[in-house]
Image: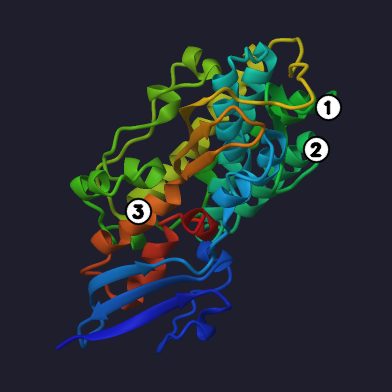
């Protein structure tokens, strides 16, 4: 005999017609939105089936893009995944740049790579903080640097078509190097033993669901756009992604921790090779992408962030479709949760990093 319950996470769960609510606490990343799971459980509360229920935080981003010119699109492009803001802006900027054949200045290319890695470091620390409170110190440090460069703490709006809005402040690169020298992933106090064997996502299921990012690489999916489809700055860095095969909660968290160290190394390399020169191009008042379509993608903190841009030669996109990592990744919960005890659910979900706005884009 089994029972079906709905797990709701977020302040609005009680208004969504759920019968039984388990509140996983305000530090859980999915508390940013109405994140629901319909679970079928045995009498001793072991999960036998799980269905992620999405559609309660619809942002309407793709339709909003279609009635805005390309400069305005960039101000909205960072909001569906608010922890990957810089990378999401970049994916849209790349699409327009490739459609129009722009040659982005070298300094902007290297600063983009550097800021992507700082954005990744910040995002990973947010997800690691519930497991290791000392991660919050690192998160605050990198967020302060991003704010100093862009003026924003979450929605950076620093990318521009053709480069960046402006150059970084004087002395900023020195402060970045000083901060990076203090980041020690090994100092994060995480109880990996408590996570081992929980919520195993098999390799074949990760491939079937199109899971990317640290969650996919924890299940043996050896795919990272920084190596497999690199931006110009990454081509010379000799990057090797972190890949594990266990696929359990401990492996997912270890991937996040190891990627923190990787991001520190890549950021140092970007600082060492950062050239001088301009960071943007002089553009006409109205930017019009030629008729046609293009697909661009970047390695965002949670996986592949892609943009399919279709243009009819106007100053607004005819269609701008987002491929967001959380949308694919969250569906894999139906494969990894069966066999998990309800008591272990918080531990499993704490290892499974998603942003709800990135799902209901």
Q: Is residue 154 left or right of residue 53?
A: right
The CA span between labels 2 and 3 is 34 Å
Asked if 66 appears above or below 194 in the picture, the reply is above
Residue 80 seen by the camera: no
Q: Residue at x 19, y 46 (%)?
A: 204
Please identify the residue farthest to the right as the structure is shown.
170
**Local SS, label 3:** helix
Q: Identify the mark nearer the N-term, 3 or 1.
A: 1
Assess disc 2: are there few (<14), some (14-19) or many (≥20) residues with their C-alpha within 10 Å of its C-alpha.
some
Please give the label number shown on residue 148.
2
Asked if 163 appears above or below 70 in the picture, the reply is above
> Residue 67 at x, y = what percent?
65, 46
Assess disc 1: are there few (<14), some (14-19) or many (≥20) residues with their C-alpha within 10 Å of its C-alpha.
few
> Residue 305 at x, y = what percent?
48, 39
Asked if 357 appears above or below 149 in the picture, the reply is below
**Local SS, label 1:** loop
Q: Which quarter of the picture shows residue 4?
A: bottom left
> Residue 259 at x, y = what percent?
47, 37
Do the CB atoms of the residues marked 1 and 2 lie less than 8 Å apart? Answer: yes
Asked whether 17 or 273 is in front, the reply is 17
- Circle 2 or circle 3, nearest the eye: 2
**Local SS, label 2:** helix
Q: Which residue is mark 1?
A: 169
The CA span between labels 3 and 1 is 39 Å
The CA span between labels 1 and 2 is 8 Å
Q: Residue at x 55, y 38 (%)?
A: 318
Q: Is residue 59 left or right of residue 72?
A: left
Q: Identify the mark nearer the N-term, 1 or 2.
A: 2
By what rule are the colours in the image chosen?
A: rainbow
Q: Which residue is mark 3?
A: 250
């Amino acid at each position: 005999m089994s029972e079906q319950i709905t797990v709701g996470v977020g302040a609005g769960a009680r208004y969504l017609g759920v019968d039984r609510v388990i509140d996983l606490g305000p530090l859980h990343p999915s508390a940013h939105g109405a994140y629901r799971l319909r679970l079928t459980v045995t009498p001793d509360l072991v999960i036998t089936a799980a269905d992620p229920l999405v559609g309660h935080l619809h942002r309407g981003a793709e339709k909003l893009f279609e009635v805005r010119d390309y400069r305005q699109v960039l101000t909205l492009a960072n909001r569906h995944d608010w922890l990957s803001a810089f990378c999401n802006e970049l994916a849209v900027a790349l699409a327009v740049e490739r459609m129009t054949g722009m040659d982005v200045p070298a300094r902007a290319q290297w600063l983009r790579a550097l800021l992507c890695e700082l954005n990744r470091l910040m995002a990973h620390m947010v997800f690691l903080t519930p497991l290791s409170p000392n991660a919050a110190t690192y998160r605050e440090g990198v967020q302060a640097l991003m704010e100093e460069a862009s003026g924003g703490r979450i929605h950076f709006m620093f990318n521009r078509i053709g480069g960046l809005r402006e150059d970084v402040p004087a002395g900023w690169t020195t402060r970045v190097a000083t901060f990076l020298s203090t980041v020690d992933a090994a100092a994060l106090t995480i109880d990996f033993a408590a996570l081992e064997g929980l919520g195993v996502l098999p390799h074949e299921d990760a491939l079937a669901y199109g899971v990317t990012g640290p969650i996919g690489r924890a299940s043996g999916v050896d795919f990272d756009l920084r190596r497999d489809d690199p931006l110009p700055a990454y081509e010379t860095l000799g990057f090797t992604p972190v890949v594990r095969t266990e696929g359990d909660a401990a492996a997912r968290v270890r991937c996040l921790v190891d990627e923190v160290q990787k991001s520190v190394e890549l950021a140092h390399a970007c600082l060492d090779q950062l050239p001088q020169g301009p960071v943007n191009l002089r553009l006409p008042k109205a930017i019009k992408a030629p008729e046609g379509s293009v697909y661009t993608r970047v390695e965002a903190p949670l996986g592949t962030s892609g943009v399919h841009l279709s243009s009819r030669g106007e100053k607004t996109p005819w269609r701008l479709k987002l491929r967001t990592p959380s949308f694919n990744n969250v569906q894999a919960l139906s494969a990894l949760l069966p066999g998990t005890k309800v008591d272990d659910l918080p531990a499993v979900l704490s290892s499974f990093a998603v942003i709800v706005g990135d799902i209901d884009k």
